[in-house]
Image (cartoon, helix red, strand yellow):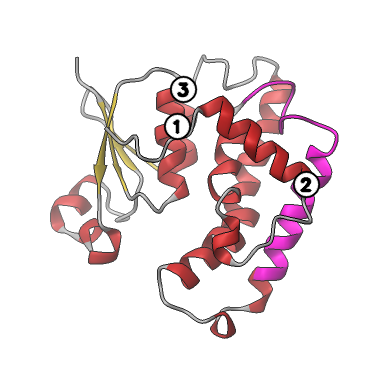
Amino acid sequence: MSKLKIYANHVSGNCWKVKWTADYLDIPNEWIEIDIFAGASRTPEFLARNPWGQTPTVVLPDGRVLTQSNAIIRYLAEGSRLIPIDLYARAQMDEWLFWEQNSHETTIATRRALINYRGKKESEVDPGMLAGGKRALKRMDDHLDAHDYLVGDGLTLADIALVAYTRVAPEGGFDLEPFPAVRNWIARIEGDLSIDETKVA
């Protein structure tokens, strides 16, 4: 049986979202490491598969290609317990997915990448990213103070999407100590997903 092929880089939370979703749903998959820092996602071969030159990129068992992490996990989880049946709850999940890409990743993940992988000093990074990331964490903490999960009473794609970069936010200079509900939620989701970043085969 052909496996889902995940062209990915191990430092990318967006890539881990796809791996965790596939593993949680027992979808056979193969992680293919792409060294984005060495230009491996910009080769003619890779661009023929994904013209945007981004990871994650997945090749389905039938050969079709999908890109964009939240679109990929939405596809993989269709009909599963990770997507609420109730239409309003499903829309709430999508709210978090859109917010994650527009307000969370653009501050927390981007600042982490600039400092840890692009060699920028903190003084060279837009201070607005730190402020924006703290606002995002506060937004999550306020919600999670009264809820175990982002939507409903169980794990959904919203949790998988948001935990990917939230759990490594300290690498971007974000102190999680002021956000106890977020810290408790991270531990809960890591347990639900049995996260093991050494498992890429």
Q: Position of residue 75 (x, y in %)?
A: 44, 27
Q: Which mark is residue 24?
A: 3
Q: Which mark is residue 180?
A: 2
**Contact? badges 1 and 3 (CB < 8 Å):** yes
**Left or right of residue 134, residue 43 in this image:** left
Asked whether residue 154 is drawn in magenta, I would say: yes
Q: Amino acid at mark 3?
A: Tyr
7 in relation to 176, above or below:
above
Q: Position of residue 144 (x, y in %)?
A: 78, 38
The Cα atoms of the two marked residues, 1 and 3, are separated by 6 Å
Q: Amino acid at mark 2?
A: Pro
Asked whether residue 198 is drawn in magenta, I would say: no
> In front here: 191 or 19?
191
Q: Which mark is residue 20?
A: 1
Q: Position of residue 151 (x, y in %)?
A: 72, 29
Q: Amino acid at mark 1?
A: Trp
